[in-house]
Image (cartoon, grey):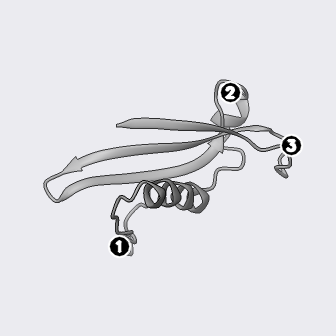
Amino acid sequence: MNLRRVVYVADHPSGHEWWQVHVRGYHHHEGLELTAHFETDPSETPDAHVDRVGIDIDRGLDELDAVLDDAGVATRRLTPVAGTAAS
């Protein structure tokens, strides 16, 4: 699964106004794993997107949590195991 929600942020410190919460989902035998990050919108600022300007994993996960909470979806947040790559 590969989803995004575009948002307008008028006062972001980077000066860019169009951003996205980018969510990816992976199916495992235990259930669905979701990862998310907040980043510049590639449609509006392709160079900033490629350069990873302002990327924020914690904000993306917080926004995903809020959407799922509002929808009444039960979740649990996992932390990466030391020595592994976080996504």
| Type of the residue with mark 3 | Gly
Q: Circle 2 sits in a helix, a strand or a loop, which is it?
A: helix
Q: Nearer the viewer, mark 3 or mark 2?
A: 3
* Picture coordinates of residue 76, whole percent (x, y): 35, 69
Residue 13's disc is none
User: Which residue matches tag 1?
Assistant: 81
- From the viewer's perspective, is 27 left or right of 60? left
Nearer the N terminus, badge 3 or badge 1? Answer: 3
Vertical position of residue 8 compared to residue 37: above or below = above
Q: In the rendered image, which residue does mark 2 sit on?
A: 46
* Residue pictured at 56% horizontal, 38% vertical: 5
Q: List x then y, in percent, for residue 83.
A: 38, 71
Q: Which image quarter holds the N terminus? A: top left
Q: Residues within 10 Å of mark 1 (few under 14, many from 20)?
A: few
In the rendered view, tell whether residue 31 sits above or below residue 42. Answer: below
Give the SS element for disc 1.
Answer: loop
- Badge 3 vs badge 1, beta-carbon distance below 8 Å: no
Q: Which residue is mark 3?
A: 15
Image quadrant assignment for residue 49: top right
Q: Residue at x 84, y 43 (%)?
A: 10
The C terminus - image quarter:
bottom left
Q: Secondary structure at mark 3?
A: loop
> What is the C-alpha distance between the residues marked 3 and 1?
35 Å
The residue type indicated by label 1 comes to Val
Q: In the image, residue 74 lies at what x, y percent?
A: 33, 64
Q: Do the residues under discs 3 and 2 have CB atoms within 8 angstroms?
A: no
Instruction: Answer with mark 3 or mark 2, whichever residue precedes in sequence.
Output: 3
